[in-house]
């Protein structure tokens, strides 16, 4: 019984950690989306690296390129992880008129398209 309780606590903490990381990721991407409306016309092609941010746990890297926001999973563990994240980001931005599209690009990472 104690083992089952410990496993439930482990899984609960794992899911709480994942939710916290996703919430942090959305805060980072929201900041870039907002800044393209208030602070920057574009991050430029070469300047994006200096604005790159990571989630605290290092799982996600967010990098602006022009008016696109690139989201990379640093160590994807499952084949469908990018597809799942793309769908979550699409849902998150579905009512935001500043986001034109969310897609998986040819490099395999996710792009949040804020082009006019």
Image (tube, rainbow, N blue to C red):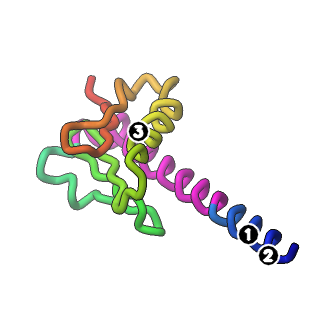
Q: Earlier in the sequence, mark 1 or mark 3?
A: 1
Mark 1 touches mark 3? (CB < 8 Å) = no
Q: How many marks?
A: 3
Q: Identify the residue at image location x=24%, y=37%.
A: 105
**Gap in angstroms between the C-alphas marked 2 and 1:** 6 Å
**Gap in angstroms between the C-alphas marked 1 and 3:** 28 Å
Against 101, residue 60 (above or below) is: below
Q: Percent from the top left, x then y, of residue 85?
A: 45, 42
Indicate whether residue 26 is drawn in magenta.
yes
**Gap in angstroms between the C-alphas marked 2 and 3:** 34 Å
Q: Percent from the top left, x then y, of residue 113?
A: 30, 32
Indicate whether residue 70 is drawn in magenta.
no
Question: Label 2, on which residue?
Answer: 3
Q: Percent from the top left, x then y, of residue 112?
A: 34, 36
SS label for mark 1: helix
Q: Identify the residue at image location x=47%, y=68%.
A: 56
SS label for mark 2: helix
Q: Identify the residue at image location x=27%, y=23%.
A: 116
> 110 left or right of 7?
left
Mark 2 touches mark 1? (CB < 8 Å) = yes
Question: Label 1, on which residue?
Answer: 7
Q: Identify the residue at image location x=28%, y=52%.
A: 63
**On-image quarter of the N terminus:** bottom right
Question: Label 3, on which residue?
Answer: 83
Q: Earlier in the sequence, mark 2 or mark 3?
A: 2
- The residues colored magenta run 15-42
User: Outermost residue toward the left?
Assistant: 46
């Amino acid at each position: 019984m104690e083992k089952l309780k410990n496993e439930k606590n482990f899984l609960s903490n794992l899911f709480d950690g994942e939710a916290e990381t996703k919430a942090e990721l959305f805060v980072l991407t929201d900041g870039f989306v907002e800044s393209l409306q208030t602070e920057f016309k574009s991050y430029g092609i070469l300047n994006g690296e200096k604005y790159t941010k990571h989630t605290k746990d290092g799982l996600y890297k967010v990098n602006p390129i022009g008016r696109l926001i690139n989201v990379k999973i640093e160590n994807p563990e499952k084949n469908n992880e990018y597809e799942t994240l793309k769908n979550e980001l699409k849902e998150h931005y579905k009512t935001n008129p500043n986001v034109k599209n969310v897609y998986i690009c040819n490099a395999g990472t996710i792009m949040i398209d804020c082009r006019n």
